[in-house]
Amino acid sequence: MLEGAELYFNVDHGYLEGLVRGCKASLLTQQDYINLVQCETLEDLKIHLQTTDYGNFLANQTNPLTVSKIDTEMRKRLCGEFEYFRNHSLEPLSTFLTYMTCSYMIDNVILLMNGALQKKSVKEILVKCHPLGRFTEMEAVNIAETPSDLFNAILVETPLAPFFQDCMSENALDELNIELLRNKLYKSYLETFYKFCKNHGDVTAEVMCPILEFEADRRAFIITLNSFGTELSKEDRETLYPAFGKLYPEGLRLLAQAEDFDQMKTIADHYEVYKPLFEAIGGNGGKTLEDVFYEREVQMNVLAFNRQFHYGVFYAYVKLKEQEMRNIVWIAECISQRHRTKINSYIPIL
Amino acid sequence: MGSLFRSETMCLAQLFLQSGTAYECLSALGEKGLVQFRDLNQNVSSFQRKFVGEVKRCEELERILVYLVQEINRADIPLPEGEASPPAPPLKQVLEMQEQLQKLEVELKEVTKNKEKLRKNLLELIEYTHMLRVTKTFVKRNVEFEPTYEEFPSLENESLLDYSCMQRLGAKLGFVSGLINQGKVEAFEKMLWRACKGYTIVSYAELDESLEDPETGEVIKWYVFLISFWGEQIGHKVKKICDCYHCHVYPYPNTAEERREIQEGLNTRIQDLYTVLHKTEDYLRQVLCKAAESVYSRVIQVKKMKAIYHMLNMCSFDVTNKCLIAEVWCPEADLQDLRQALEEGSRESGATIPSFMNIIPTKETPPTRIRTNKFTEGFQNIVDAYGVGSYREVNPALFTIITFPFLFAVMFGDFGHGFVMFLFALLLVLNENHPRLNQSQEIMRMFFNGRYILLLMGLFSVYTGLIYNDCFSKSVNLFGSRWNVSAMYSSSHTPTEHKEMVLWNDSVVRHNRILQLDPSIPGVFQGPYPLGIDPIWNLATNRLTFLNSFKMKMSVILGIIHMTFGVILGIFNHLHFKKKFNIYLVSIPELLFMLCIFGYLIFMIFYKWLVFSAETSRVAPSILIEFINMFLFPASKTNGLYTGQEHVQRVLLVVTALSVPVLFLGKPLFLLWLHNGRSCLGVNRRGYTLVRKDSEEEVSLLGNQDVEEGNNRMEDGCRGVTCEEFNFGEILMTQVIHSIEYCLGCISNTASYLRLWALSLAHAQLSDVLWAMLMRVGLRVDTTYGVLLLLPVIALFAVLTIFILLIMEGLSAFLHAIRLHWVEFQNKFYIGAGTKFVPFSFSLLSSKFSNDNSAA
């Protein structure tokens, strides 16, 4: 980038940045959550959401309201906003936004392949796909039988194509291989995205790199945790870790050798960032590792808004909105299943 | 006028609404728009309120109505807008209405669903026929192979060399044909190639006509394709890829015969479908037409109903749940109407116990209610844009009606321009009932809303234009100039006078480019022009010097009068709020400060105008120097304006100097004294004396239940007002800041009024330039071509006059006039910290369909 990119930033991206900051201001506040938690039925929830920036997005839904209806409508809204950003964006912001959708696309592809494996119809699974990661070719995913098939026939022209370089294999796509494929794709995706942000330089790099590093480390932890007690070999495990982040390279090597949760925790204790996170597990309210990571992610994303003239706000906004949607869905689930004891364990957005 | 001077007196009333009649009572209140409801359930979230179910029902109805309007619009049926707004539906009818609407919705949904299905079917059939027609050409190309392919399965055992490979695969030739969206063709073909590794033959052709997509309803271009492939495996893949690209796949006929049969069958089916579809559409139209008749009134009714329930949600229940208690702000003048409305509501619902009201005392600040009409509304808006007046405060809008257009006109002084503006405003005023003006877009609407302001601004500009004697920058000689040029000639005077005076003779006139008239020569100046400025100044080279001096003094005089008036209005506020000490300790020192300095300046200006004549003008002292000397006490004495001037000025200065400490310290010290000595007295209660002693007695007359309620309310009322703690430091600080602001403001604000002069000068000069650059050029051309040239010149002149002088200059003068009011005038007395009275009124609900349409 040129020197003094701040000077020209607003020419191309000022409008969108303003917009996204406005959108961020419309996130639900603590007071909103307190009110939502008090709701007795989903109808109450709907009425309360109407008083927020969600407006009457559920107005045209016929009764009875279900959690999945709320979820789809919220996703649709987010998708609409994102499409608007994307349609009005200029390079390199548009590439950045494309990178953002890639993770959803990977998820969708994996979801569809899993569905094909379980002999479910494509239509049924399409509904579950995240609208942000939708692309035309994805419906044909179940034609493929091997990863290289998948690449050659279907995904070669999509933005996902570059991530396939590491995972071209002729193995049949069974459940484990799909999972491996997902992780390899993710690894490759995160690395490319990281490189893109790093090369972009400026504030964007300063903001996005820590977020992506955290994301990589989180993946490493989660992969390790999930691989305990499976047939995945330690060498294979190591190949799945994204090759950057705070843990890279020593931490990852240690993680690859870890055999249970306690060993993982000792490794995390070496890092001042992750030590407090692992200590918070099981604390007040029985938090899981996932919750702790989510909280940390929210924190980082909120901080992204403190800087100006960078693309990280778009990433942060979408992630925050996603968290908010997860919160609402959680609360809605608790309400509809009359399981109110856990209703307060949503992740507050600061 | 009284109602515009101060906002109306308000009282807090409690409405006891029997739960059976509450709805009708509120409906009656809403029609009249008398009262503002207070939210008594502020800490209850919206979904926990009492009438949330009813609100939900209203929303459901709204949803149905939106759907109806959407369908009606789609069918292009005009929506009649009723003139009168129907009252909120009686409760008995609501259920009926809901049932009706729901039935209608179900019916409509079913019919439209059927229609859609039929249409989709029809479209598919049409697509199929198109496909058959187009693929015929593909087949012709293949026709020579066709028999071989078809017989292929049966020929399995025969060894046909040509097809041995196929035989080995045990495959069968298959066809998939269908239609695909134009934009996807390329990607589709590529994907096919990649996925099937080239074992397919794709041929496609563009369809010449655009067809509607059965799913989205878009009209797009389509391609017809035919894929031939070998083998089951690939067939599956091909089908999946077709699904992926949302192709419309139709069975491909194997023989020409089959094709013909299908085609015939299709044709008859299409015919049938057409008739059925037509009938369905007719029926749908009938249903919609019937619905369209009542939909407008329904929309309004539901809106009113929803509004009523929202208001009811603000009420609290009494202990027995038998009646609702609402708290409302109501202007005292409207109490009678309020009672009447309650009675009406009770009567309508046929309740045995009437709903009634009860005035309760409060210390809270009521909202500000100023009744306006269409004339005063615009002026009130100017004031409200600065800040809604505090309760019962002097409302500057009343004076703004005259001062605003006047100050504007001082800056915009031109007879011609003012007249054009006046005519424009008059046009708006005369056509104010025209519906197109009411619904015009933003800019026009702005003019329309300010039409009465514009009218007065135009009128006043005509007046100031006459005073300045400016009409499109030219002077008008209405009464004949009072300057006589011939009197300057030596021939008209006696020889004795020749010696003392500089007179003109032929050589002087011939050799000088500039001649000076001397008013001291008898006969040259015959007294002032009857109205405004003498037109002869239009010819003078020192016109600007003369006008500048005049306009500058005028702006200072107007400004000081304006500001002094503001301070005097402050006295009315203090009188009304029973804070007499403020008059002695704040207003009078302020007045003294202002008048002793700037009042004296005005005096000097007038004195100089009146005392010094043309003969003595050479010895007249400069006001500026005199004014500066008033503060500097110079060693060298000037001769001064009048005898004893020095002493007068000393006295004035002393008064000014004395008023400053009073202004700074008077009020805080007095309040401190009050607090220490007589803090129990009610004099120092700032704000409002609202407590009506008799209303407490009224409370005691009520039944036990109600008294309890009343007491509760009174406690609430007391809770609402935070006890004012006496904080001397804070009061001193505020007063000091206020005083500094005032003293410095007196100087800077006076200077600020010079904008009157500056803008009026700018306006006059700009119009002068326009005249000189355009009209003078146009008029100079000789007569034969001049007429031809003059036409475009006049047109250009008119356009520039309107855009630059009227709109642009008008806007800037308007803004400066607003500033002079908001800053210089209103900060002398106006607090503007009130809240506007927003009555619960159905007329504030938007009764337009356009909203629904945009929402739909």
Image (cartoon, coloured by chain):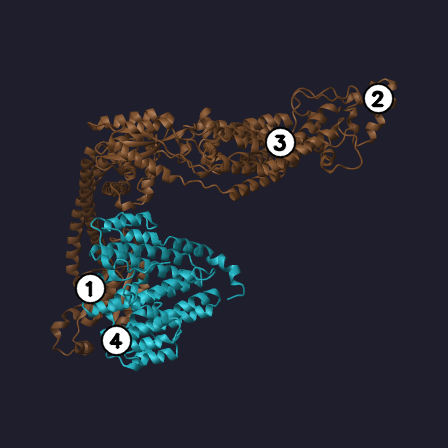
Chain colours: A cyan, B brown
State the SS at label 4.
Answer: helix
Amino acid at the residue labelled 3: Leu
| Distance Cα–Cα, label 2 vs label 3 | 54 Å
Whether labels 1 and 4 belong to a single chain: the reply is yes
Pair 1/3: label in front: 3
Looking at the image, do the residues carrying marks 2 and 1 touch, with CB atoms under 8 Å apart? no
Disc 2 target residue: B490
Image x and y of residue B53, in percent: 23, 43
| Distance Cα–Cα, label 3 vs label 4 | 93 Å
Mark 2, Cα crowd under 10 Å, few <14 / some 14-19 / many 20+, is some
Disc 1 target residue: A121
Q: Is residue B630 left or right of residue A157?
A: right
Per the rendering, the mark at residue A177 is: 4
Image x and y of residue A44, in percent: 25, 49
State the SS at label 3.
Answer: helix
Image x and y of residue B291, in percent: 23, 37
Q: Is residue B766 in view?
A: no
Looking at the image, do the residues carrying marks 1 and 4 touch, with CB atoms under 8 Å apart? no
**Upstream in sequence: badge 2 or badge 3:** 2
Count of numbered badges drawn on the protein:
4
Disc 3 target residue: B592
Chain at numbered mark 2: B
Looking at the image, do the residues carrying marks 3 and 4 touch, with CB atoms under 8 Å apart? no
Per the rendering, the mark at residue B246 is: none
Chain at numbered mark 1: A
Chain at numbered mark 4: A
Quadrant placement of the C terminus of chain A: bottom left
Mark 3, Cα crowd under 10 Å, few <14 / some 14-19 / many 20+, is many
In the image, residue A244 above or below residue B436: below
